[in-house]
């Protein structure tokens, strides 16, 4: 086995190289003038960012939140099981990971000649074996520049095989093998949501415990990542595509040696003696709590003429597999990954490690930032060497009084027009660090302009509190135990109309307000209220049944009562019937959109003219006071007293005196 001590100098050299790079660029940065940002609404931050050294938890985040995207290492570098990501994540993070996987092959051919189609393939004898393999991979990946990641991994594998159907069976326990991979990944964000790069890996194999049997393989890959969530938070999907090469081998180097190898050893030791290409595709969905993903891998061996002459089946063998898994991201800094792989095509061919029919795996990754408090922080060096990293602005809009979230609020952030979603959250497109001015407008709240300092903490959620410019009214109308539907009219400079249901909630402008309530069944009512900003008031009002025959009609711009308004004889007191007539008058005033009217007061003949004018004025005032109690402001009523000067019938009979004791209501203005 190749001892880990052989690789310690390599890892130490790689670490020191990153530190020296950051230190050497620190002085260069301090002597270089900084250019102003190009965007007119952007100003540079006044202080160096203070980064969060941990990957944030995704608990309680919403779908589409950029913080759901979790960069974590698994087998080697930042990415998934097979597929590497060109989106490296935040510079300065150091990822440590441990991955354990188990695979098993039933009735595996002991030799290549015993494979499918051979004479022995129809029986389960000693030519076939059951083979299991355990693998543990330790890896470290350091994103010490925004465009550069260095990684190293050490893989330990052990195998166990049993073959033969008789008892006892023959068993074989394979030796522990240690393989090491060192690599660099270069990646860059070339356009919004698009990342591309190159992975350069060198793998060192040991075919047994002798150092003389070390083999090398160069494994370059082209990487492409498309983060659809950067274009629209409503599409939380990330697509990865890798095209790789495997140049080199870790198995026998001649056909003579191949003849001495067995198929189950090739599987157990993961032997490979063919240059090959690989295609890896992956799709992940960064959601709160977890990120499910699916991967597809296909391997295409490169065959030579000698292989083609030996067997045409070799040239058609290209292992393919499909893998399903999920990254659990509920804990800060830690990522737990679990899943399984199913092989779609598992050929048994010489000199190439067969793929097991299935595999299960479990991995854990820790993200830390060991140099966050250091003068030569890799994050600081990355910001000095390259353009500032882009990240979205995340915020939450709440009511300043109740702290309740406000959805569907219009937000203008520079050229971007956003809207708060459920729970009041909003998220912009990826932006460089700086000061941004946001303009917020919401119905029922005062407009607000606020400056957000973006970049000091990329994981910060900016809180925006809006002060209510209106009150909240919860209103319901009833007749007995039954809710009454209808309409609410808000009168004034900015009239509004609202449908009225069982218990409706309205945002009413602060201050004195005139509300007219029009039920579908019953008499309409006027409600004069005064609201304070942010006040919440609940009202449940009883509705009076409408009379069978209408008491009031609108005729030629006059409200005509079916009968004269009922007063006590020779007095200025309204009877109960007169009060009921005025309630019907208010209903007609509301339903006909009448804003103001003139009240003309008449009385029957009196002893003197002065007494007639006095009684006429007193009765008119009684009507005005009664209407005021019903919600009709006195300023809406103009009063004209005629005394007994305009009789419409003789005063000598009681019926004539009743007709002369009248009130005329003339419409002056409508809403």
Image (tube, rainbow, N blue to C red):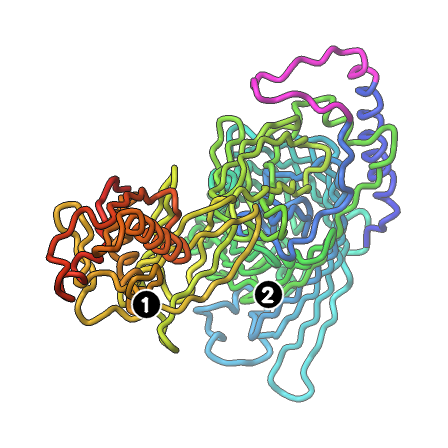
Q: Which residue is drawn at 49% across and 43% down?
A: 409
Tell me the SS state at disc 2.
strand
Bin the neighbour count of mark 2 within 10 Å (Cα to Cα): few under 14, some 14-19, many 20 and up. Answer: some
Query: Residues in magenta?
Result: 27-47
Question: In front: 620, or 131?
Answer: 620
Q: Which residue is drawn at 32% across and 57% down?
A: 487
Q: In the rendering, at what x and y percent does residue 92 appear?
A: 76, 36
Where residue 358 appears, as percent x and y from the top left, is: 56, 67
Q: Residues within 10 Å of mark 1 (few under 14, many from 20)?
A: some
Q: Residue 359 carries which label?
A: 2
Report the predominant secondary structure element of the magenta stretch.
loop
Residue at image mark 1:
575
Question: Residue 187 got which mark?
Answer: none
Position of 243 relative to 482 (above/below): above
**Disc 1 versus disc 2: nearer the observer:** 1
- Residue located at (60% from left, 37% from top): 393
Q: 292 or 593, which lies in front? A: 593
Q: In this view, does 358 lie above or below 318?
A: below
Q: Does the magenta stretch include residue 46?
A: yes
Q: Quadrant of the N terminus?
A: bottom right
Left or right, residue 467 beside residue 443: right
């Amino acid at each position: 086995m190749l001892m880990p001590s052989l690789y310690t100098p390599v890892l130490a050299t790689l670490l020191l190289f990153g530190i020296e790079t950051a230190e050497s660029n620190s002085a260069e940065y301090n002597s270089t003038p900084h250019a102003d940002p190009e965007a007119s609404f952007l100003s540079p931050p006044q202080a160096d960012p203070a980064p969060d050294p941990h990957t944030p938890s995704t608990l309680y985040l919403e779908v589409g939140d950029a913080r759901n995207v979790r960069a974590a290492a698994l087998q080697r570098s930042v990415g998934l099981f097979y597929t590497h990501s060109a989106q490296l994540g935040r510079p300065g993070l150091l990822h440590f990971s441990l991955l354990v996987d188990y695979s098993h092959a039933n009735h595996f051919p002991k030799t290549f000649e015993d494979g499918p189609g051979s004479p022995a393939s129809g029986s389960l004898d000693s030519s076939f074996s059951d083979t299991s393999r355990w693998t543990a991979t330790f890896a470290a990946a350091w994103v010490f520049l925004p465009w550069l990641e260095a990684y190293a991994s050490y893989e330990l594998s052990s195998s166990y095989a049993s073959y033969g159907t008789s008892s006892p069976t023959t068993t074989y326990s394979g030796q522990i093998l240690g393989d090491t991979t060192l690599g660099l990944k270069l990646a860059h964000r070339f356009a919004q949501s698009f990342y591309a790069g190159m992975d350069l890996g060198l793998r060192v194999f040991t075919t047994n415990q002798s150092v003389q049997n070390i083999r090398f393989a160069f494994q370059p890959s082209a990487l492409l990542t498309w983060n659809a969530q950067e274009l629209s938070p409503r599409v939380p999907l990330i697509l990865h595509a890798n095209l790789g090469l495997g140049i080199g081998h870790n198995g026998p180097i001649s056909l003579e040696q191949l003849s001495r190898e067995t198929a189950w050893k090739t599987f157990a030791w993961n032997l490979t003696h063919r240059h090959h290409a690989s295609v890896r595709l992956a799709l992940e969905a960064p959601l709160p709590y977890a990120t499910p993903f699916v991967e597809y891998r296909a391997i295409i061996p490169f065959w030579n003429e000698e292989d083609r002459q030996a067997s045409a089946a070799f040239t058609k063998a290209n292992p393919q597999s499909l893998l399903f898994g999920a990254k659990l991201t509920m804990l800060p800094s830690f990522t737990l990954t679990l899943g399984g792989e199913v092989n779609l095509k598992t050929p048994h061919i010489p000199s190439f490690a067969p793929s097991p029919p299935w595999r299960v795996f479990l991995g854990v990754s820790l993200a830390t930032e060991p140099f966050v408090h250091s003068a030569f922080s890799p994050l600081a060096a990355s910001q000095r060497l390259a353009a500032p990293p882009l990240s979205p602005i995340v915020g939450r809009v709440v009511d300043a009084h109740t702290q309740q979230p406000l959805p569907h609020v219009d937000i203008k952030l520079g050229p971007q027009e956003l809207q708060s979603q459920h729970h009041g959250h909003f998220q912009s497109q990826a932006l460089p660090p700086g000061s941004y001015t946001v303009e917020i407008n919401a119905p029922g709240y005062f407009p607000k302009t606020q400056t957000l300092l973006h970049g000091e903490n990329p994981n910060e959620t900016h809180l925006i509190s809006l002060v209510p410019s209106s009150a909240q009214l919860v209103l319901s109308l009833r007749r007995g135990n039954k809710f009454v539907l209808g309409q609410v009219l808000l009168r004034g400079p900015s009239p509004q109309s609202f449908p009225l249901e069982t218990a409706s909630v309205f945002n009413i402008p602060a201050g004195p307000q005139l509300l007219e309530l029009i039920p579908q069944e019953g008499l309409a009512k006027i409600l004069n209220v005064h609201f304070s900003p942010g006040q919440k008031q609940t009202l449940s009002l009883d509705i009076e049944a409408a009379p069978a025959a209408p008491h009031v009609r609108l005729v030629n711009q006059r409200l005509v009562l079916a009968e004269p308004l009922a007063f006590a004889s020779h007095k200025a007191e309204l009877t109960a019937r007169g009060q009921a007539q005025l309630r019907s008058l208010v209903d007609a005033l509301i339903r006909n959109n009448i804003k103001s009217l003139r009240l003309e007061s008449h009385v029957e003949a009196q002893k003197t003219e002065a007494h007639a004018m006095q009684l006429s004025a007193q009765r008119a005032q009684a009507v005005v006071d009664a209407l005021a109690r019903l919600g009709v402001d006195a300023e809406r009523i103009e009063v004209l007293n005629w005394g007994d000067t305009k009789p419409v019938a003789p005063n000598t009979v009681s019926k004539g005196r009743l007709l002369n004791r009248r009130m005329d209501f003339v419409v002056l203005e409508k809403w």
